[in-house]
Amino acid sequence: MTRRAQIIHLILFLSSLVGISWAVTGSFAPPTGDASIWLHCGLLMVVLGMYWIEPYFTKPADVVINGLVVYISTSMLTNPPYQPWWLALRYMSLGLIIVAFAVVWAGSPAVPKHDTSRIKRLFYLIVVRIGNAKILFSAVFFLALLSYFDLHSPIARWLVVFWGVLLVAKHLELEGLVDFLRGVFRVRSANPIGQLSRFAEPDIVRFQIDPNAICRRGRLVAFTSKGFADGSSPLAIVIGHRTGRTSVEAEAVLVDSKFAEGALDNRRVVTKVDRNDPMVAARLSDNAFGSQLDSLVGFASQKSDIGRLRFELNRGTQFEEGHLVSANSLTGTPILFQLINGILFEEPGLESGERAFTIGEAQQLGTWDTHRQGFSAYSWVVPENALVFRHSERTDVQKVLKPGQVDVGHVPNSSYPVNITLADLVLYHSAILGVTGSGKSFLAYFLLEQCAAAGVKVLCLDLTGDYRRYIHGGVRLKSLATVAAFLDDTASRIGIVEFTEGGGKHPITATKEIARATLDWCRTNRTKEEIREPTAKVLLVIDEAHSLVPEWNSNPVPSLRDTVNSIAQIALQARKYGLGFMVVTQRTANVTKSILNQCNTIFAFQAYDETGFEFMKNYMGFHYVQALPNLKKRQGVVVGKSSVSDRPVIVRFHDQDRQAAEQEVPFFESAQYASNEVEGA
Ligand SMILES: Nc1ncnc2c1ncn2[C@@H]1O[C@H](COP(=O)(O)OP(=O)(O)OP(=O)(O)O)[C@@H](O)[C@H]1O
Ligand SMILES: [Mg+2]
């Protein structure tokens, strides 16, 4: 029972007692004489005990007082009916006083604890059970009823009913009932904070804030005639302030824009209302806009542009990079933005000296297109002061994996999948970039396996030996001679070529030869339809690309610079013949741009290297590049032709359950070439 509920009960019962006393005695003056003991030492004490003095539990000290009251009151009766009973009650209360006093004296705790002795606990429990106000004074009340009232009279019956109500009321939700009744008649708060001044736009209203009032952005207000909001007071949310020389005006957007200007006219007093007030809450939840207010996180500030939303975050809002916010377009469609940065600002405030605030910077994803299964860009600049909401995580995104698409992860903190079209991934080349250990190779394994499953032949050029350990179901190619045979073969789809630097041909040369052989094979196997429209046939994965296709100035063997150029030339023609490159590196700056620039899809993990940023800026723009150093584990930015979304997306890649196995990966053996190899060895 709350303190407030206690007070409500106390007031209700005390005033009823005055009424009852009047009904019994015919006067408002306090009754006197023996018979009045039903009130003074009966019901009144029950009310005070239950709802004021010992509302939660009874202490032995309370019992001493209760006992004394009963002892003294009963001692003053002169020849009452049922004398022996009164005597018994009197001595019992005397007994209680003594025992309770002894318990207090013995240093009993307020609540019987297990570490006190059993005897003490027993006495404690006996005195508080019998000596609490409810029991002791009820006994007095009933004996008085028996002694001084005609039990068949209506008044006696009503007294008993009142006593019953008194006892059970504690367990009723009286407080809730009172709140409900108040809510029905009017919204609780009368907190005038200003005066309506004018309409700015159909649903935007301005009001002058009273000099001493505080009215922050995001506050819910109501327009009233006298300061009391009722069920039909228009509600609005404060979205901004305008400071004049002598006054401050607040701008508020009407939650329910059906209110006409005339209707507001006689409701000039602006008052604060509480969002949790039952009636306000009910109205907000009935209203599409109102129901969004709970997720309001801020307001658009200046300098937003088509791709970017800048907004002032409400105090106490917790955000991380990649989280989604939304703003409603003019037609009410939620446009999604992904947070990429938060900056703390300080500025002299309008209300109370300095104010610190955070500007969130979010990049537009656009609207979710269920049909495409990606985000479509939306050309619209979020106007200043537009409301920004945390995108509801409950939104059920209808996920359907379309044929030819794979889902590489999801937008952090949401269930939006991030989908990739495999054919475009292969045909338009891709690059996976990021610091060492960020998960580039793991992403490559996943993507290449998906391509293989979709019927694309995959050739992996590997300097590390990891591909053989992590990719199951592949074959190893011994030499260049087996490339064409492997591509012809229908049994295995993933071929791994391991280069060991130092032995035989230089890996750069080997890379060129394999690329050339693959292109030749693709050319030979091109069908007529594929001349018109190429299909993805072979994916060439070049991991540790800074070693296999190095940039001009970082080429360890200057004589191989032209070789790298030839590889870039192959990449240039590759699409026509259905050959795609996937370049994986932790050193973006050291990979030849003549190949990287051809990669249309970029997967960028966490990165710090400034020289690499220059390159990535062209793909994802300055703002996403800024976010790269702060990306979390397994997060990356995906952008480009194969991404189903129009704009870059920060994605949380799937966790993969992939274990390194030192199993022997079989060498690719074809009847034709196997013998050659043996001979050559
Ligand atoms: N999607 C994933 N699911 C589970 N574990 C992962 C995932 N991605 C990476 N890892 C873990 O992180 C480790 C490093 O990943 P990975 O080898 O892909 O990094 P990398 O970016 O290729 O690094 P390097 O540049 O050194 O080659 C893996 O061995 C694996 O344990
Ligand atoms: Mg790697």
Image (spheres, rainbow, N blue to C red):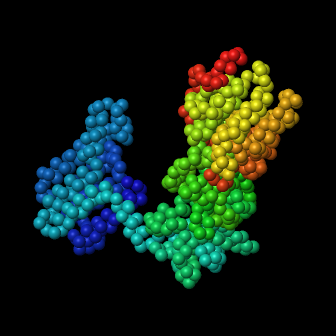
Q: Depth check: give the residue in front, 394 or 143.
A: 394
State whether residue 424 appears in this view.
Answer: no
Decide: is 659 above or below 64. Answer: above
What residue is drawn where x is 68% and y is 51%? 532
Q: In the rendered image of this protein, does residue 590 appear above or below residue 12?
A: above
Q: Quadrant of residue 652?
A: top right
Classify 319 as above or below 548. Answer: below
Identify which residue is drawn at 64% across, 30% down.
486
Residue 611: x and y, percent?
Answer: 81, 41
Q: Nearer the viewer, residue 148 or 4?
A: 4
Q: Residue at x 74, y 47 (%)?
A: 625
Quadrant of the rendered structure where residue 298 is? bottom right
| The N terminus - image quarter | bottom left
On the rendered structure, is 31 left or right of 110? left
Q: Quadrant of the C terminus?
A: top right
State the residue at coordinates (29%, 42%): 100
Res. 269 in view: yes
Q: Quadrant of residue 368?
A: bottom right
Q: Is residue 199 left or right of residue 285?
A: right
Q: Residue 282 or 412: which is nearer the viewer? A: 412
Instruction: Indicate the position of residue 104 as horizontal and vertical percent values.
Output: 34, 39
122 with respect to 440 (left or right): left
Looking at the picture, how far across and down is residue 495, in whole percent?
64, 30
Across and down, in percent, residue 377 comes to: 65, 59
